[in-house]
Amino acid sequence: MSDRQLDAAIAAQERAIRHWKTVLMAVVMVLVVSALVVGGAILFPHYAASQIVAEPASGQEQDPTMLHSAATASASPTPSPSPTQLTLNGVTELALENLDAVDGNSEFATLGLELSDEANAQIEAAVQAITDQGYGVSFVMVDLSTGGVLSAEGNVERYSASSIKAPYIVSLAQTGTIDLGTVASGNNLMLANLIANTLHVSDNDAYDTLYTTYGRMPFLQWAADSGIADTQIGYYGDLTALDLARMWTMTADYLFAAKPMRGATADASARGWLADQMIDSLNSVISEAEPERLVYSKGGWIYGEGGFYALNDGGIVLSGDDALERLDGRPSGVVVTVLSDACGRNDLLVPLVEALVAAVDA
């Protein structure tokens, strides 16, 4: 082989080596990129999935606006909450608005709440049983999962009796009139006993002491915050089922929200202590109607003293074993308030409460 032929063979060999080096590098790069993509999909599956827009079916044209919408959705921060995502604060705000807007003069009205025919029939039958005995009744229900409300003669004023005691004590706590943290921690046993006895067994002397000590102004301030701007109630007095429902809706938010919307004057454990004093309260038709559920309530009754006749109740009914733990972020249950002159006739009011709670569960 001549020198010229040898040089040509060497040059050809070098070109071949450079070619295969290039091919080999390309293959390596493809493998590396593939590994990164697959690894990213494994490590960040939600991100990877959000970048993929599904191809249209074979032969189907894809609307360019769909591509734009998909890209916008993947870049969007947080979607607006749906009704099922409402926190307890959100439900409280919506419920208070609905309580203001519902027809309180109607015999039966709903707002933001749809009832089945069966639920309507059960409620109607319970009311009929009460009125057939010559008694009058007003009631309101608030769905704590949606803020929807039901009102039956909700604007009719009736004597409160002791049903006012729980809202009064909550007003002292939420306005900061009393230091609930000190009370709940056992550092003010006298005040703790007054509160517990007032709520548990409706002790009139204990309530007298609280009212004499702290007066009416904290309650008026708190009531105004719940939308009751012109209340004349004080120690005891006339109120409506709608007003009592506003108070108990505010109470639910104060006791159980992570951050009560009208201000947290105590930590969650202190507010939990206050809530516990409302469990199994004396002569509560709500507790009697729902023995298998978690009920926070305060009844009121009087039989002829001073010419007053009343069997009333207001409270919160929670559904499910984990209802309390998930109440703030995924609220459920109901607020129920009932005012009547059917003193001593728990047997008439219990079926009404059962029908109201079942109406939301249905």
Image (cartoon, grey):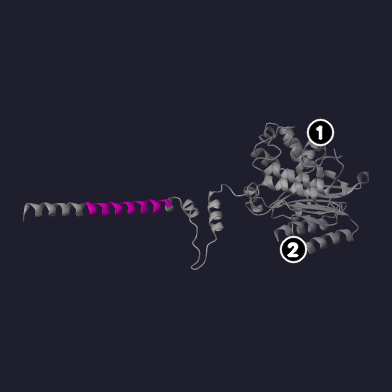
Residue hosting label 1: 217
Tag 2: amino acid: Ser
Q: Is mark 1 on a helix, strand or loop?
A: helix
Q: Which residue is drawn at 58% across and 47% down?
A: 78
Q: Residue 145, relative to residue 126: is it above or below?
A: above
15 relative to 306 in the view: left or right: left
User: Front-most of 99 and 218?
Assistant: 99
Q: Nearer the viewer, mark 1 or mark 2?
A: 2
- Please report whichever mark, 1 or 2, sits nearer to the chain's N-terminal start: 2
Residue hosting label 2: 116
Q: In the image, is residue 289 part of the stretch drawn in magenta?
A: no
How many angstroms separate mark 1 from mark 2 (CA)? 42 Å
Among the 4 quarters of the image, the one containing residue 250: top right
Q: What element carries label 2?
A: loop
| x and y percentages locating residue 138 in the rendered image | 84, 53
116 relative to 4 in the view: left or right: right
User: Front-most of 315 and 7?
Assistant: 7
Tag 1: amino acid: Met
Q: Residue at x 74, y 48 (%)?
A: 95
Q: How crowded is mark 2: few (under 14 residues within 10 Å), some or many (20 or more)?
A: few
Q: Residue at x 80, y 47 (%)?
A: 100
Q: Residues within 10 Å of mark 1 (few under 14, many from 20)?
A: few
| x and y percentages locating residue 60 in the rendered image | 52, 67
By secondary structure, the bulk of the magenta-drawn segment is best described as helix
Tell me if residue 141 can be seen: yes
